[in-house]
Amino acid sequence: MLEVILVDDDDIVLMMQRKMISRCKISSKPIIFKSALETLEYLNKPENLENKEKVYLIFLDINMPLMSGWEFLDKIKKHVLYDQIHVIMVTSSIDQKDRSRAETYQRVIDYIEKPVTVKHCEVVKQLKSINEFF
């Protein structure tokens, strides 16, 4: 089972991503968090820690207060669900350093410059690590 999570501190971005993810049939009901810290707390819930069947696809913003996307990626390196997590960086950053840095994280499977479009969604659905869900 694929569970899609959207993480961004901007309500408008979250609304647009939710509509696009639903319209493209990636997920009809993605889970939404306004911070990476909330996402980590969710992953740490006992019912999630015990579920080895669930796979997480996280659309993660880089620049957020409290915990950045980079800090989140560093935290999940030792997480019990690490192998079940796939991350797509979704950012307004056009800095090549950010794209290069994202490539150093094993669980990052794509990098999207905002906004998420239908074309991005089609690429996501073809990604080898998650295409079995579509």
Image (cartoon, rainbow, N blue to C red):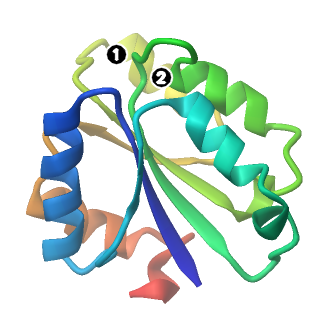
> The C terminus is located in which quarter?
bottom left
**Residue drawn 33% across the image and 75% down it:** 27
Q: Secondary structure at mark 2?
A: helix
Under mark 1, the amino acid is Gln
User: For this view, does 28 lie left or right of residue 5?
Assistant: left
Q: Is residue 46 left or right of residue 115?
A: right
User: Hey, what amino acid is under mark 2?
Assistant: Ser
Question: Residue 40 location in percent, x, y?
Answer: 67, 40
Q: Is residue 60 above or below residue 104?
A: below
Q: Is residue 62 above or below residue 119?
A: above
The answer to which quarter of the image holds residue 106 is: top right
Q: Are marks 2 and 1 in contact (CB under 8 Å)?
A: yes
Q: Residue 49's image quarter?
A: bottom right
Residue 104 visible in the snapshot: no
Q: Which of the two residues, 35 or 71, is positioned nearer the viewer here?
A: 35
Circle 1 residue: 96
Q: As drawn, is 76 to the left or to the right of 72? A: right
Give left or right: position of 97 versus 45. Answer: left
Give the alpha-carbon distance from disc 2 to disc 1, as whole Å. Answer: 6 Å
In the displayed structure, would residue 20 be above or below residue 95? below
Placement of the N terminus among the 4 image quadrants: bottom right
Residue 118 at x, y = what percent? 10, 63
Give residue 19's position: percent from left, percent from top. Answer: 14, 62
- The picture places residue 133, in percent across and down from the top left corner, at 47, 86
Q: Which residue is mark 2?
A: 100
Q: Is residue 86 visible?
A: yes
Neighbour tally class for label 2: few under 14, some 14-19, many 20 plus, Cα within 10 Å: few
